[in-house]
Amino acid sequence: MHASAPRTSASKKATHRRRFLVIAVALFGFAPLGAWLAARLLVVKADIAAPDVIVVLSGSSTYVERASRAANLYSEGRAPLILLTDDGLIGGWDHREDRNLHYYEMTAQRLQQLGVPKDRIQVIPGLASGTYEETLLIRDYATSHNLKRILIVTSAYHSRRALWSIRHACEGSGIEIGIDSPAPGWQTPTLWRWWTKRWGWKVVGGEYVKMIYYWTKY
């Protein structure tokens, strides 16, 4: 009897995933309303009370909107500390530093410009080579520093996959996860117009491909 429970749980999860994908594929066929709904399905938020930290996921070119949202949450007193991850990617040239900065360094600069004290910003050790690997780094850091409630900040269309990844990685750890994001349309395509541009198909359409890959691999 005990052996059947995990299989039942896994079966239910697989059924939910199939339904989600069927709905998403169907919606793609009814533009522009269908395109709006398909994009909207990717955007999730999960509030969490009194998080110990805010974690800004690596976002390369979208670091500005993610940093801005994290700074707003910090200024609201949601958490006393902001953590950054490092995806190893290098951004633009900094004349003061006389070198190209990593995106996590540019994120830290942006946070400070928006009023977050330097000593309230820390970088999680390790290279975040992908979203799932990034969530493992977050889980390990949280476990070693006794962090029990984490508020993740990422871009809107990345939020569903990011939330699934971090909750999957933290399953059984006792760590509570919330997620927040800036509204689409700043450094990402709008909900209504994404499907008219190649960039939008890469950002929105690509997320569905990545989610299928994640559900299959992890």
Image (tube, rainbow, N blue to C red):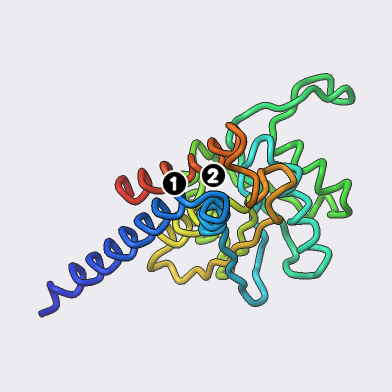
Name which residue lies at 74% across and 37% down. Answer: 105
Q: CA distance from mark 2 to mark 1?
A: 7 Å
Q: Position of residue 187 (x, y in %)?
A: 71, 42
Q: In this image, 172 relative to 198: left or right?
A: left
Name which residue lies at 68% across and 51% down. Answer: 184
> As drawn, which residue projects farthest toward the top?
98
Q: In this image, 84 relative to 8: left or right?
A: right
Mark 2, residues whose alpha carbon is within 10 Å: few (<14), some, or many (≥20)?
many
Q: Position of residue 61 (x, y in %)?
A: 68, 35
Q: Nearer the viewer, residue 218 or 193?
A: 193
Q: Nearer the viewer, residue 141 or 107?
A: 107
List the residue tagged with mark 1: 208
Q: In this image, 157 relative to 93: left or right?
A: left
Q: Position of residue 46 (x, y in %)?
A: 58, 69
List the residue tagged with mark 2: 204
> As drawn, which residue projects farthest toward the left?
1
Q: What kind of element bears circle 1?
A: helix
Q: Looking at the rendering, which quadrant does residue 202 occupy?
A: top right
Q: What kind of element bears circle 2?
A: helix
Relative to 184, does residue 198 appear above or below in the rendering?
Answer: above
Q: Nearer the viewer, residue 33 or 64?
A: 33
Question: What amino acid type should be assigned to the residue bearing mark 2?
Answer: Val
Q: Position of residue 1 (x, y in %)?
A: 10, 80
Q: In this image, 167 relative to 3: left or right?
A: right
Name which residue lies at 20% across and 71% down. Answer: 8
Q: Marks 2 and 1: CB-CB under 8 Å?
A: yes
Relative to 196, does residue 42 appear above or below in the rendering?
Answer: below
Question: What amino acid type should be assigned to the residue bearing mark 1?
Answer: Tyr
Mark 1, residues whose alpha carbon is within 10 Å: few (<14), some, or many (≥20)?
many
Q: Nearer the viewer, residue 78 or 180?
A: 180
